[in-house]
Image (cartoon, rainbow, N blue to C red):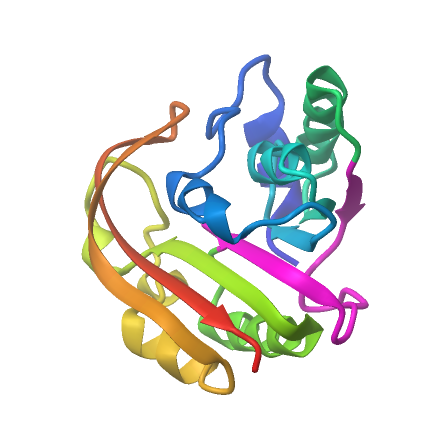
Amino acid sequence: MSDAAAWDARYDHGGFTFGATPNRYLESLTPRLRPGMRALALADGEGRNGVWLAKQGCVVTSVDWSEVGLEKARALAAEQGVAMETVVADLTQWDWPRGSLDLIAWIYLHMPSAERAIVAARAVEALAPGGLLALECFCPAQQGRRSGGPRDPDLLPDEAWLRHAFAELELLECLTGTVLLDEGPKHQGQAEVVRGLFRRR
């Protein structure tokens, strides 16, 4: 498991480390959402993406390895008047659903490449026919920038990795470039990211 204790410490304060509003790429997919969609928010931390999906009418499961983060996620959901399931889990060990999800939000989930491959395979298996996987992560060009992201290059996927890891899915878009992040104190400024949107055939 990732260092859950370190993430607990990072989230153990009054504010929101990555903000309380959704990731902008995920938000841009609003036209593809419909009420009742079964959605999984990976590495959802303090719940910003899971809560937003629930507000769009999705049936949401929010997974993270930090109990402290998910406690704040539950409070945010209650404040926003929505319900969502929260699960504290290591995604490499979690008992994933199979063939039942309409949307997986993989937003800034950074793992060592070997573990990332396991999670990618589980995510593919979890999607229902027509289900979408949306991903945004820092890419290798982000190294050395102050706008956020891991320092270990093994934690930074690139576009080639996305295309390979999700080759079984239909590619709707996959791109690399510069975005301006404004997501709480830890994601601020110009950043180099990779984005992908895939669909289960």
Relative vertical location of residue 192 with respect to residue 96 in this rendering, above or below: above
In the rendered image, which quarter contains the N terminus?
Answer: bottom right
Classify residue 160 as left or right of residue 33: left
Q: Is residue 167 magenta?
A: no
Where residue 134 appears, as percent x and y from the top left, is: 48, 59
Q: Picture coordinates of residue 106 (x, y %)?
A: 52, 56
* 90 is within the stretch colored magenta: yes
Residue 123 picture quarter: bottom right
Query: For residue 84, which quarter of the picture?
Result: top right
Instruction: Name the residue at 72% across, 46% down.
Output: 60
Identify whether 165 is placed above or below 189.
below
Asked whether, in this view, residue 154 is left or right of residue 93, the answer is: left
Residue at (68, 22) in percent of width and height: 76
Residue 152 as seen in the image, left or right of residue 56? left
Tell which of 79 and 88 is nearer to you: 79
The answer to which of 147 and 133 lies nearer the viewer is: 133
Query: Of all residues shown, which one is farthest toward the top?
Result: 14
Q: Quadrant of the C terminus?
A: bottom right
Q: Which residues are magenta?
A: 84-109
